[in-house]
Amino acid sequence: MKPILYIVIPCYNEEKVLPITSKIFLDKLKELIEKELIHENSRILFVNDGSKDQTWEIICKLAEEESFFMGISQSRNRGHQNAVLAGLMEAKDQCDITISIDCDGQDDIMAMNRMVEEYLEGAEIVYGVRSKRATDTFFKRVTAEGFYKLLNWMGAEVVFNHADYRLISSRVLKEFAEFKEVNIFLRGMIPLVGFKSTCVYYERLERMAGKSHYPLKKMLALAFDGITSLSIKPIRMITGMGIFVSFCSFIGVIWSVVIQILGKTVAGWASMTSIICFIGGIQLICLGVLGEYIGKIYLETKARPRYIISERTKEKQGDSKCLNE
Ligand code: UDP
Ligand code: MG
């Protein structure tokens, strides 16, 4: 039995690139169907992440013209991770496998053939891994690779150079649906589900049009979110640092008592000030990190919905229409 594939594509303000890449995705889907790798009920599912431009209108038009296309729209912009999650959860009951991919054409769609083949050979999760970043700028390459190293060092285990281009079977997605947290970092969470997984390698290309939504600031925010959602290593590091500083202070106290007894005390204003500043700084950092975790607990206890779908393109006897839910 050939698997039904849903290609899940998050789109945020992508009116420039969508008309170009939608054709490429469609050709790929048709090719996979022709090669008898996937079932003809396979679909391309666009997730509009509260775009402010014409993205949703373009998706509706695509769905009207071609029954392979369908779309859902989030009630507002919730970020890339939530958009992918919304798409995966929407797809999981209608298909056997999903492949999530960005809509800008940067991830090489040729890798999809190998992903599906790996699935047919028994893998439940297939990670798309960038083998080279030749087309990225030096800055993007260094910061992006630093991002993966920092994540791993901080205890959030991720597959090096893998972003959100991956195949996941619906069996894994059904288990993953039980992960109810609202702070989501998919590339760190999916490996936690387990099951047989493998990697396929591809070269990352340049964005076909439009511009990146991940400047350094957002990437740092994502790294910080990833670390604090997946690992408590920073809290352990604070404890370690506390023990180290206390040990140094203990030696300092002994030293000052000895100096006092020997009668060699000096004014010592500079050293005193620097110690106070140093300890003050460390305490503030530690409080900040602890605060971040408390903030996360706060958000988790509220358990607000992780995405809200406001509209869907609906299929009607072969053709699709844009409907309000
Ligand atoms: N994206 C999204 N919501 C956002 C930001 C981005 O759905 O708030 C989508 C975007 O349309 C694209 C993907 O996430 O399909 C990756 O974004 P981008 O290409 O800007 O990131 P980069 O590849 O530069 O890291
Ligand atoms: Mg991109």
Image: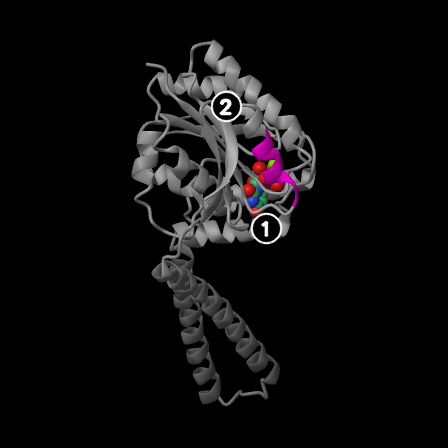
User: Residue at the location (47% across, 82% down)?
Assistant: 256
Q: Is residue 146 visible?
A: no
Q: Amino acid under label 1?
A: Lys
Q: What's the mark number on residue 218? A: 1
Magenta stretch encompasses residue 119: no
- Report whether 63 appears left or right of 127: right
The image position of residue 296, as x and y in percent, is 41, 60
Name above or below for residue 105 compared with residue 156.
above
Which region is colored magenta? Answer: 53-61
- Badge 1 density bin: few <14, some 14–19, many ≥20, Cα 10 Å: few
Q: Nearer the viewer, mark 2 or mark 1?
A: 2
Between the residue at mark 2 and the residue at mark 1, the CA separation in whole angstroms equals 33 Å
Name above or below for residue 81 compared with residue 208.
below
User: Residue at the location (33% across, 42% down)?
Assistant: 177
> What residue sits right under mark 2 in the picture?
68
- Name which quarter of the figure residue 258 lies in: bottom left
The secondary structure type at the circle numbered 2 is loop
Secondary structure predominantly adopted by residues drawn in magenta:
helix
- Report whether 240 appears left or right of 9: left
**Ligand 1's quadrant:** top right
